[in-house]
Amino acid sequence: MGNDFDPQARAEAAMKEAVRADGPERQRWLQLAQAWLELARGRPDPDGIGQPA
């Protein structure tokens, strides 16, 4: 089974929603985007870019 789930894309989508929202809803979208970004950082980079030598 392939894994085509992309947390980076989910984070970007959440940030776009945050731009459209306001007040507490904006804060929730920003927190969600931050969580997706943290998940994205935990994934290995398939190209090896940004990995320590």
Image: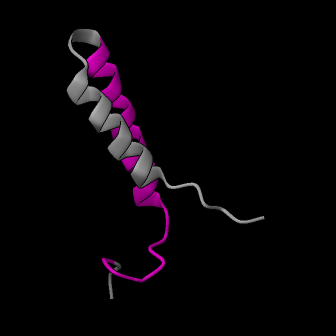
Residue 9 in the image, given as x and y percentages of width and height: 41, 51
State the quadrant of the N terminus. bottom right
Judged left or right of residue 43, residue 26 is left
Q: Which residue sits furthest front?
A: 20
Q: What residue occupies the far bottom of the structure in this picture?
A: 53
Q: Residue furthest top?
A: 23
Observer-nearest of 2 and 42: 2
Residues shaded magenta: 25-50
User: Is 33 drawn above or below residue 31 in the view shown?
Assistant: below
Residue at 31% x, 14% y is 25
Where's the C terminus, which quadrant? Answer: bottom left
Q: Residue 8 in the image: x percent, y percent? A: 40, 53
Magenta run includes residue 43: yes
Verify whether residue 30 appears in magenta. yes
Q: Quadrant of residue 50?
A: bottom left
Is 48 placed above or below 32 here?
below
Near-viewer residue (23 or 40):
23
Can you give x and y, in whole percent of width and height, for residue 31 in the image? 33, 29
Total number of numbered labels? 0
Image position of 47 (left or right of 24): right
Query: Of all residues shown, which one is farthest toward the right?
Result: 1
What residue is shown at x 37% (from left), y 48% (from top)? 37
The answer to whether residue 13 is left or right of residue 26 is right
Task: Describe residue 28's horizontal placement relative to residue 44 as left or right.
Answer: left
In the image, residue 5 lies at what x, y percent? 58, 55
Q: Residue at x 47, y 51 (%)?
A: 7
